[in-house]
Image (tube, rainbow, N blue to C red):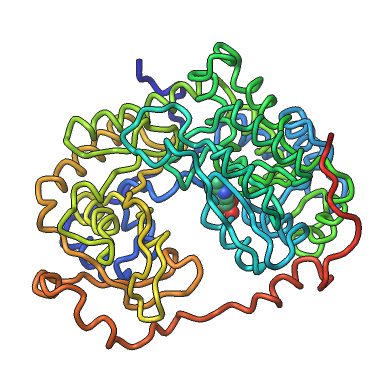
Amino acid sequence: MLMEPYRIKVVEPITLTDRPEREKFMAAAGYNPFNLRAEQVMIDLLTDSGTGALSAAQQAAGMGGDETYAGSPSFYRFRAEVEDLTSYPHIFPVHQGRAAERILFGTLLRPGQISLSNTHFDTTRANVELLGCEARDIPCEEAGDIRSDHPFKGNIDLAQLEAFLRWGNVGQVIMTVTNNGGGGQPVSIDNIRRAGEICRAHGIPFFLDAARFAENAWLVSQNEPEFAGLSPRTVAREMFALADGCVASLKKDGIVHMGGVIALRDAGLAARCEQALIAGEGFSTYGGLSGRDLDMLAQGLREGTDAAYLRGRAAATAHLAGLLTDAGVPVVRPPGVHAVYIDAGAVLPHLPAELFPAHSFATELYLEGGVRAVEIGSLMCGSVDEHGVLTKAAPRELVRLALPRRVYTQSHLEYVAETAASVMKRVDELPGYRLVDSPKVLRHFKCRLEPVERSFRSGGLVGQADREPLAGFVDVHRDGFADAVDGSAPREGKPYSPVS
Ligand SMILES: *Cc1c(COP(=O)(O)O)cnc(C)c1O
């Protein structure tokens, strides 16, 4: 049964636009959906991050927020909630997930070290690389088959993990739950447990990137026999108990507009993170958030782990995936909870990776129906040279339709599926795109593109090498960044000691 387990008390109008208007908006945005304005978008599936609808209880909790600089009761309510979930004794609020990454990695990693993950999220990778370290993804083998219905395609490859840890120079292992970059696929508790054991045996810290911990817990309760019938909250507790700590964006399963957390077991590591927190985010009892935010978060974390809410959300996502499949639009299987991923590479064989086929599909979803989605393919994850020419393609060309929490109804999702079905009818005519400007790191947020016409395409990528270098393609100052994080250039002091 598909029924949203809530009713609507406050509404917000959607600005309706037509195709000629959207063509103008998209051209002015440099064909990058991140450059569109909200009122130019009809259904916004760009991200599920910070875009959820607050509940009446969260609004009420916000009114009780205490804005005391140090020692606010809002912090203690937030901390009690996170402690109940994670069992970690050292808990710091931060303004969002990437701040948690910057502080933890900057405290822990030394230049040249490797960070291992099932798949690093884009900001996670950037924060590793900005420290002069390498972010290495080692997803399980099943992750490579987007048609397989294996229930835990978010898992890490345990044999590769073991091999890397034997070989050395690994600074941390970070497990992303659910595996966002890998299609929103869940990680089994069994895989987390085994990965944690391997890390402990080698004395390497093992963290969760826990942005979607509740959705992961829901899928574990549905698909991992050992945990069948347990509440998502119980499963989440089990999951956190297996790691040395976590960084998390709470803009996802915390159902708030802004917020994140670092939570750790090790007192020494926590003390070093706390210094970076105070220098860069704010005092330990607010970390860049207001008291109001912290109270809404404490309530949001309770609602985000509610079984009825998670069941309804998973059903809505599965419904959208089903409608798309019926319309002949191939999607990554099995659908996760926070998003449906369209396999654009499979339907645009006339566009090579160099012409960013998934970006083309995402752009057309907007032009056709005002639906904003995001490419997760070679534009986001491939490598390009200073001319903007692709030098390494991504393994897959996907379009992510992320579902904000409690925002869109079943009829909105049906509209999205109809839009995608219309795009499918003209899929052979879609143009490719090429970069006209781009920064070097986190390209997809700020790059600008232009459509590539048919005549150009049939000649291959002629002329690309003669192009001017991209103006925005500049290096960031790595050492300066690393030093700013903890203020102590060579990192010394007590080595990290994982829990026994
Ligand atoms: C969103 C996200 C982040 C970054 O969090 P922000 O709050 O956007 O800074 C990190 N990891 C994962 C898996 C995420 O989904």
Give whichever of 379, 492 is nearer the camera.
Answer: 492
Q: Position of residue 418 (x, y in %)?
A: 19, 38
Q: Nearer the viewer, residue 68 or 464?
A: 464
Q: Is residue 66 left or right of residue 362?
A: right
Q: Residue at x 60, y 62 (%)?
A: 134
Q: Position of residue 67 (x, y in %)?
A: 78, 49
Residue 25 in view of the camera: no
Q: Quadrant of the N terminus?
A: top left
Q: Looking at the image, is 22 positioned above or below residue 141?
A: below
Return the residue nearer the eye: 286 or 362: 362
**Side (left or right) of 331 relative to 249:** left
- Image position, residue 416 (x, y; %): 26, 40
Residue 77 place in picture, x, y as percent: 78, 34
- Report the label total: 0
Image position of 197 with respect to 163: above or below: above
Residue 473 position (above or below residue 98):
below
The quadrant of the rendering that contains the C terminus is top right
Which residue ends up furthest to the top in the rendered image?
229
Picture quadrant of residue 106? bottom right
Q: Nearer the viewer, residue 461 or 304?
A: 461
Q: Residue at image x 46%, y 31%?
A: 9
| Residue at x 58%, y 47% (from the top left corner) | 117
For residue 210, say whether it is visible. Answer: yes
State whether residue 392 is above or below residue 377: below
